[in-house]
Image (cartoon, rainbow, N blue to C red):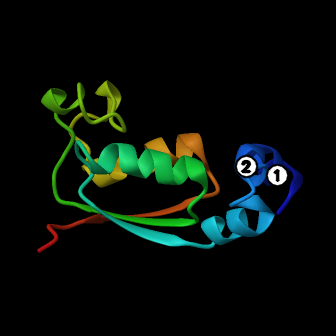
Amino acid sequence: MNDEELLRYSRHILLDDIGIEGQQRIMGSRALIIGAGGLGSPVALFLGSAGVGHLTIVDNDTVDLTNLQRQIAHTMSRVGLPKVDSAEVAVAALNPTVTVVPMVARAD
């Protein structure tokens, strides 16, 4: 872990149940998020800001103006974009070290 990461995750590291080793496990972990809407949108932001190293986000919808009051990863400037691409931009703005793989697809 470099100095910037130590500073970024210092509050996690101070927790007895996490520490440096736990944060390194978080950073090396992967998560699959199905949907980038009302639930998936904040999940992506929280996992990305916590440092989960690799996020795969699956959704087949686009950002619509009617989404913005509840889907917090999306913005006016991204209306019309695939939600997965919008979520990727939002996560990168919070934590550029997280790898986001956007998949425009319907999970079934």
Q: Residue at x 26, y 47 (%)?
A: 39
Residue at position x 58%, y 65% in the image: 53
Q: Secondary structure at mark 2?
A: loop
Residue at 18% across, 33% down: 67
**Local crowd at mark 2 within 10 Å, few (<14), some, or many (≥20)?**
some
Q: Position of residue 29 (x, y in %)?
A: 56, 72
* Amino acid residing under circle 2: Tyr
- Of 25 and 71, the residue lying toward us: 25
Q: Which residue is mark 2?
A: 9
Find residue 75 and report its horizontal and vertical position in percent: 33, 30
- Quarter where residue 51 is shown: bottom right
Q: Residues within 10 Å of mark 1 (few under 14, many from 20)?
A: some
Return the residue nearer the eye: 96 or 14.
14
Q: Position of residue 31 (x, y in %)?
A: 43, 68
Disc 1 to disc 2: CB gap under 8 Å: yes
Residue matched to label 1: 6
